[in-house]
Amino acid sequence: MAVQSWIDDLKSSQKTALIHDGKRKIHYLFTDGKEMAEEYDLKTDELICRKWRQKSALGVQGVWQVEVGEPVNMPAALDPDVIKENCSNPLFMRKDTKNSFQWRIRNLPYPKDVFSVSVEPSERCIIIKTTNKKYYKKFNVPDLDRNKLPLSASALSYTHANNTLIVSYQKPKEILTLEQELLKEVKKLKGTGEGDVDCKTH
């Protein structure tokens, strides 16, 4: 089963743990060379951040791709001469709860009835669009893809407040079980107090 396959990949990966600033940070190095870094809140066990990176075909270390949590702010954003995104543009990010995958899109000042949020099972994605054609977003749910679980329209809901659209997808029981199992594994790791999280990659 695909869920078991992902659990096995996680268990067989090389893991490094670090406890810092009220967070448990875990770095995974998989047998295929991919890296995953996660941060959990020490008090609530909530996943704060998950990001991935892999080396290019030439062996060059790639940049981190954020899957869960705030998008990485590039240092260039501090440079006034660098062209950067307008801060009033919609900002898309994922921030999960215990029972739901959740995406927040800030800077969307339209009424709720303008939005349409739907599941496209054939493309394994969620689609957000507006009747005023001001916003369109198509995105997948990597957790469901990794575990080869189907997308269900009945698990999807959304709300809108303070110029922010919040899209929730109820986690299937297989994901909830997997997350509990992973958390047990993570808590077994002996975390160092300070320093870099990166594993040796060569």
Image (cartoon, rainbow, N blue to C red):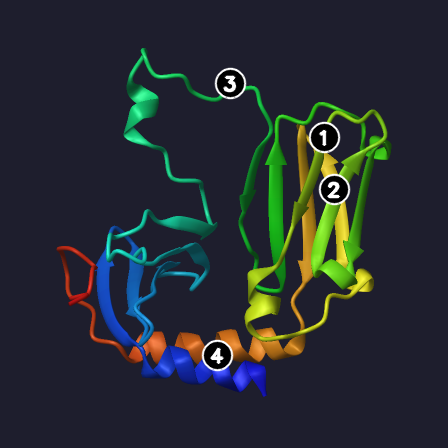
Q: Quadrant of residue 198?
A: bottom left
Q: Are marks 2 and 4 in contact (CB under 8 Å)?
A: no
| Element assignment for label 2 | strand
**Where's the C terminus, which quadrant?**
bottom left
As displayed, is residue 182 above or below residue 151? Answer: below
Residue 184 visible in the displayed image: no
Among numbered discs 2 and 3, the one appearing first in the sequence: 3
Q: How far across and down, in percent of the image, does residue 103 sit?
A: 61, 47
Q: Earlier in the sequence, mark 3 or mark 4?
A: 4
Q: Which residue is mark 1?
A: 135
Q: Is residue 4 left or right of residue 106?
A: left
Q: Residue furthest front?
A: 58
**Amino acid on which the number 1 mark rests in the picture:** Tyr
Give the quarter of the figure containing the N terminus: bottom right
| Residue at numbered disc 3 | 86
**Residue at image point 60% right, 68% down:** 145
- How many marks on residues? 4
**Which image quadrant is residue 14 in?**
bottom left
> Given the image, on which type of amino acid does mark 2 rest?
Ile
- For label 2, the residue is 128
Please name the amino acid that badge 4 sits on: Trp
Report the front residue among 24 and 105. Answer: 105
